[in-house]
Amino acid sequence: MPSLVELATDLLKAAKALETHLQASKLPNPDHDNDALSSLPPELHRQRLNIINGADNLKQLALSPRGVAQELLLSWTSHVSWRVVYAYNVAAHVPQEGSCSYASLAEATGLPESILRRVLRHCMGNHIFAQTAIGEVRHTAISRMMATDSDFNDAVGLELDDFMPASTYVLDAIRKFGDSGKETDIAFTLANQSYRPNGSNGDGHGDTEAPLKSTFEIFSQNPERARRFGAGMRYFARDGLGDPRHLLAGFDWTVVDVPGTIAVDIGGGVGTISQFLARNTKNLHFIVQDLPGTVETGQKQLPADLRDRIDFVAHDFFTPQKEGARIFFMRWIMHNWADKKAIALLKAIASGMRKGSQLVIFDYLVKDEPQTLATEKFTADVDMIMLTCFGGVERTESEFRRIIGEADERYVFEGVRRPEGCVMAIIAVGWKPTN
């Protein structure tokens, strides 16, 4: 283990590299009011990661094990204060420039001033809002995003109002269902009390022994929650987590970009990824598959200049695919399903594979060994979300290899690529016909 001075020296070296770039680009130094590091060139991205990981390691060593444990044990309190701020739409009532008094903010939001002061004091400790020298409330970069970026605000609500409350039911779900692999046997189902109507005697009472609705079904039955889910996921997609630019960089689309080539976007929603790929290729024709209501919306929203390149087809992706596509691809699909359903999905795709076909999976990839670096913990965090809210799982490369091989022996695992700056990976799978 390096000494504290050695760790600090490495941090200083990385910080100097970033500061040199900022000065040359005439950008301000990073602070909690602005984001000066949102668009670093690729060659400096590694230096940024070095700062994050080094600072986190130095902090934990300085805290000592007891300090780290205390911080972890109390981390839930940050969600409490932030959730109150979200629920009362506090950010929208703080001026974009300047500040406001606690009293006027309490009146505007309907939140008692005594509670407002307490939750904002806590949020400010995380640089969500700040207090001026005269004791008024002003925005920081994070709080301003809640007021100006509706997708970000919905992402906050999705995590704090939908996902976080379900976490208190994880133990109940494990004790009740074990590892059944069913998308209904999860904490989110218990938290939302979505139970099967008793069909044995027709008395209409809920049968608490037979949960039925999946998370997606629960969302679909509440238009506002469904809207928030879609907007939140849209934010995460554009915030670099599932940025389609990585899919473009991590797979050589030029090889298949020839006239007559069909690419099937499985579970492609309203066609966001297909639209991006269509604008970055010349000849590929895309077929977006999803639920009937989703593809109907996608068709209506499709820009006129892409209507000859993209079609929408309602399709249950657990049913066999038709032959004819050169490329089948999925983003954020496989991790939604436990192994049994994931293998069933791969079997359905195998029905449409032929000589020369490829399956491209763009999803999170967990490293085989536990990760302690701050920048490598994200996939484990998402895996806990899948355990809690979807019944899915984030997989390692070896786990992907296993389920792909179990689905069909004709699949050929071609490799994995994780583009620089991307938390997801591209898994390429070929096809080897038996005859």
Image: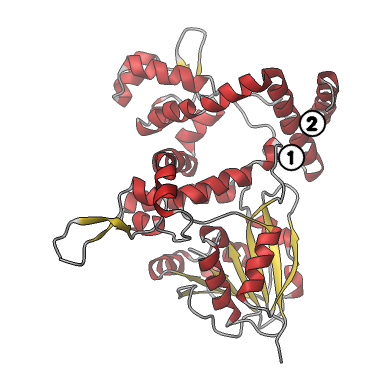
Residue type, numbered disc 2: Leu
Q: Name the secondary structure under disc 1.
A: loop
Which corner quadrant of the image does residue 262 belong to? bottom right
* Residue 238: x %, y % from top left: 58, 49
Position of residue 108 relative to residue 347, above or below, is: above
Position of residue 288 relative to residue 235, above or below, is: below
As drawn, the label of residue 137 is none
Quarter of the picture holding the N terminus: top right
Q: Name the secondary structure under disc 2.
A: helix
Which corner quadrant of the image does residue 38 belong to? top right
Give whichever of 410, 250 is nearer the camera.
410
* Residue 354: x %, y % from top left: 66, 85
Give whichever of 289, 261 is nearer the camera.
289
Position of residue 135 relative to residue 345, above or below, is: above
| Cβ atoms under marks 1 and 2 closer than 8 Å | yes
Quarter of the picture holding the C terminus: bottom right
Q: Which residue is mark 1?
A: 40
Residue at x-position 71% and y-position 37%: 373
Residue type, numbered disc 1: Leu
* Residue 112: x %, y % from top left: 30, 19
Give whichever of 11, 434 is nearer the camera.
434
As drawn, the label of residue 18 is 2
Give the left or right position of residue 234, taking residue 434 as reference: left
* Residue 26: x %, y % from top left: 76, 29
User: Disc 1 to disc 2, how far (Cα)?
Assistant: 9 Å
Residue at x-position 71% and y-position 88%: 434
The local crowd at label 2, few if under 14, some if 14 to 19, many if 20 or more residues have their Cα within 10 Å, is many
- Mark 1 or mark 2: name the one nearer the start of the chain: 2
Give the left or right position of residue 156, taking residue 87 as reference: right
Q: Residue furthest bottom?
A: 435
Residue 217 makes an appearance in the image: yes
Residue at x-position 58% and y-position 72%: 346
